[in-house]
Image (tube, coloured by chain):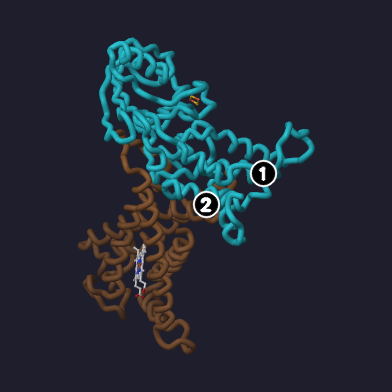
Amino acid sequence: MAVTGIVLVLFLIAHMLGNLKIFTGQTSFDHYAHWLREIGAPLLPGVWFLWILRTVLLVAVLAHIGAATTLALRARAARPVRYAHRRPVQGSYAARTMRWGGVIIGLFVIYHLLDLTTGALNPVGDPSRPYANVVADFAPDRWYVTLFYTLAVVAVGFHLRHGAFSALRSLGQQTPRGERRARAVALVLAVALCAGYLAVPFAVLTGLVD
Amino acid sequence: MNLTLRIWRQSGPGDKGRMVTYPVADISPDMSFLEMLDVLNERLTLAGEEPVAFDHDCREGICGACGMVINGNAHGPQRGTTACQLHMRHFTDGETIDIEPWRARAFPVVKDLVVDRNAFDRIIAAGGYVTAPTGSAPEAHATPVAKANADAAFEAAACIGCGACVAACPNGSGMLFTAAKVTQLGLLPQGQPERYTRVLGMVDAHDEAGFGGCTNAGECTAVCPKGIPLSTIGRLNRDYLRATAKRGDTPGT
Ligand code: HEM
Ligand code: FES
């Protein structure tokens, strides 16, 4: 969980920084997207580098889901008879929503790929013009798309809040003071990523980017 | 105080079990939770009914025998307190209280609120000890221990093995118990020879017993009557990573 999670967090950071390029204007953003398809040239032909990245991400996502499924099945088997009186959450709310949160994020990613990578669900839907796709996506009359993106990004925030701390713990973070620090790092990471990701749809919604 | 109790009744391992409602009257707020159950049991016995079976021994919060889930909380609503040390003044007159046994596949119900916690003994047997000859207590300064390590080891050694961590864990994991022992022994010089075989053996025994996997959810430490910190699990993880990198050792010997 921890290792694949870290790969995905690195992607999330890079992706967020890439998205923020939208504030530098259409030419720059579109150029960035085209550049993504040329990294590695001339050593690697065409979109190879991108496909290598995609493969790494896919492997990480599948391994992440696989490990999560094993844990969930073990948890279910470990408590065959449920409590009649369900206990309130005393630890962390984020920790208790990892499984459903993960499922929601997974569904979002599928929608998101069909929306902004293939363009199938996008009003413009031209993969060579990502700036136009994004602007059309978050237009005010498509507020429900922005809403769904917002919910998904907040879900990612919760997922990271526990996930980042838990990954550090799994990799051997062991002192109480380090625990406070690890929790702080996870919280800052979650908030920063949420803010960075939400900046784009809200900039389009409010007309800051058009 | 007058209370309504809803208690898990199960005549034996083969019985399906069910929640049964019992009214109890004239309970003193100064009684402990177990004394309140004693009152109920006396009345049940007089009425010719089967008393409610529950584990207990010291009744002063140090043996780890007692344990039940009270209104969804392992050992009840007060933090850092075993069920035997919980007083009825934490409840309100007229309240309905749900009482259930620890729920875990590794802790099968023996009867009513009594569960079989042998799985914990198997985890300890797989490495929760030191093989150095003991004899009489050694002179305290013979083996120096850094104060910080002594304190952290002592904190972990406070575990009474009651099983509340398992009862509270959303994954049904016994990792806090396992980690407490790994931490205690791993921080002391006497625990070093078996340090890495210990962690492998104990985690294997833990998984074999049918406990779930830890996801650092932190519910365990919230209910632990001895306040064993969640950071012990980090120590276990670190030892486990080192141990698996070392390879070639046989666990538990
Ligand atoms: C609201 C914030 C987001 C915006 C505006 C956004 C925008 C985009 C855009 C424009 C692309 C297409 C890039 C291209 O084809 O050149 C893309 C791809 C992608 N996004 Fe996002 N994204 C956001 C949030 C997220 C989140 C939270 C995740 C993950 C949980 C995510 C995962 C992905 C993935 C996996 C790809 C495909 C990468 C590939 O294989 O090419 N995105 N996104
Ligand atoms: S009876 Fe000993 S700890 Fe409660």
Q: Is residue B35 left or right of residue A150?
A: right
Name the spot of residue A92 as percent of width and height, x first: 42, 43
SS type, badge 2: helix
In which quadrant is the N terminus of chain A drawn? bottom left
Label 2 within 8 A of ligand 1 by Cβ = no
Name the spot of residue B216 as percent of width and height, x first: 46, 48
* Along the viewing direction, whichever of B122 and A208 lies nearer the viewer: B122
Question: In what quadrant does ligand 1 lie?
Answer: bottom left
Q: Does A16 appear above or below A100? A: below
Asked where in the image residue B246 lies, by quadrant, the reply is bottom right
Q: Does residue B136 show up?
A: yes
Q: What distance separates the C-alpha of mark 2 from that of mark 1?
A: 29 Å
In which quadrant is the C terminus of chain A drawn? bottom left
Q: Which residue is mark 2?
A: A169
SS type, badge 1: loop
Question: Which amino acid type is shown beneath numbered disc 2?
Answer: Arg
Rendering colour (chain B): cyan
Image mark 1: chain = B
Q: Residue at x 33, y 35 (%)?
A: B13
CB-based contact (under 8 Å), mark 2 and mark 1: no
Rendering colour (chain A): brown
Image mark 2: chain = A
Question: Which amino acid type is shown beneath numbered disc 1?
Answer: Thr
Q: Residues within 10 Å of mark 2 (few under 14, many from 20)?
A: many
Label 1 within 8 A of ligand 2 by Cβ = no
Q: Residue at x 70, y 44 (%)?
A: B189
Q: Is residue A46 left or right of residue B8?
A: right
* Along the viewing direction, whichever of B94 and B20 lies nearer the viewer: B20
Q: Does B221 appear above or below A54? A: above
Q: Residues within 10 Å of mark 1 (few under 14, many from 20)?
A: few
